[in-house]
Image (tube, rainbow, N blue to C red):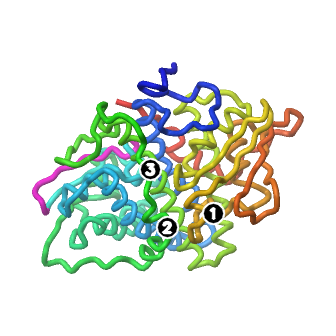
Amino acid sequence: MTTPAKSTGLDDYSSAFDPRFGLERLSHAALARLGREYMLFGHIRDRGLMPPIAARFGVRATERISILEWMGASPIYTQRMCRAMRIEGDDVATILKSLQLDVGFPHRYMDVGYEVESERVGFFWLNCCGALLDVEPYGEKAVVSMCHAIEDPTFDATAYATNPRARVRPVHRPPRSPADRVPHCRWKISIDPANEPVPEPAITRKVRAGRLADFELDPPDLPEDDGRRDYSGPFDPAFQLDHLSRRALVVACKEFLLQSQLLARSSMLALREDYGEETARELLTTQWLALAPLSTRRLCQALAIEGDGVASILKALQLHPVFPADYLRMGFELVDAARGNFWLEECTALGDDEPRGFLSLLDDPACPGLNAMVQAINPRARCRLLGAPGSSRPRWEVIVDAQAEPAPEPAEARFVALSTVSRFQLEVS
């Protein structure tokens, strides 16, 4: 059901395609729901990248790229979110606030509890960890790889963004003993002035060199009387996205998209350094093919985007997390029921340094990632790059051909389909 846009916004995108549609048109409830999906996308994208790396280069390579990916991006996006939500300070409460707004901890999928003991000591624990449930079936080695090898350096990197003297250490963590132990893990954050400050990792400096790190979002012209205007003030261990105002939710949603974009930049930098440009692009293409079907269908379900025509396809492209709003600006045109166009407009992303994650693949005339997205809605849909490859302002045509053979789902998507992220149903409180 749709509510008037002028007052409270739209509860979904079941209405007609609007070429100017943006997050600002959605209601408070829809934004909270979509925000959780955008957070979850941070996990969907990793399910699409890490298994192919493991298959080609082994588990140790997966650990290395995972560590570099999150170490490179999380300090930057943590500081971005703190600025956006007016989260100030360098104490434990500030670190915990940041974790509550981190795509690494998508609400509900990662059921996290928090406690502040003092300015220098705090705890967080996972009553249920969706990521752990994904790896436990693969045995103890897989659990140790994620919960020990990867988490130790990446948790410290996230805390470093707030206080370089902070340390995150396990109270207990998997492998679980007994096998059904709850909470799944518990971690202690401590800040000791005697600690040596953690230096900024080299990968973080490389990610920070791009324009994305300091890109400023345009604040939306929306009311702030339907929730918190930001997350200044006391720490709330029960914080949910629903507590934010509609205006603040738009900002948070856009920051979640930029968090994933920073992760994409970070992982691409790490892959290029270890395996070269060609292999990095191959793995990034594989990742896009893997995540496209699930992420597109989840988006459509969250916003009640129904049907399999071009209008529905364009709606999904307008709000898909692969295309971070504001940083990347796009235009859309519905020509008729079976044909439409979309293109890149002048924006910060076009002038940013490489690598730009999936945006670096948009010059491929075969359009594999775009096709995987549109074919999740209609397997007879196809994208075609208009003009010469390498254009600074690429433009595409999307067509639904009723006579075409339905495209099969990409084989790369099979592992993502096995993940708990494919079955997890989000609820809005």
Dot 3 or dot 2, earlier in sequence:
2
- Sequence-wise first label, 1 or 3: 3
Q: Is residue 380 visible?
A: no
State the residue in front, 216 or 293: 216
Q: Residue at x 58, y 65 (%)?
A: 356
Which callout, 1 or 3, points to the residue nearer the camera?
A: 3
Which span is picked out in magenta? 108-120
Q: CA distance from mark 1 to mark 3?
A: 29 Å
Pick the front one: 150 or 389: 389
Which mark is in front, 3 or 2? 3
Is 205 colored magenta in this rendering? Answer: no
Residue type for callout 2: Arg
Task: Report x, y in % for residue 229.
Answer: 29, 41
Q: Identify the secondary structure beneath mark 1.
A: helix
In the rendered structure, find residue 312 and report the number of the disc placed on it: none
Determine which residue is flagged by label 1: 284
- The residue located at (10%, 57%) in the rendering is 118
The kind of secondary structure element at disc 2 is: helix
The residue at 54%/48% (across/down) is 321
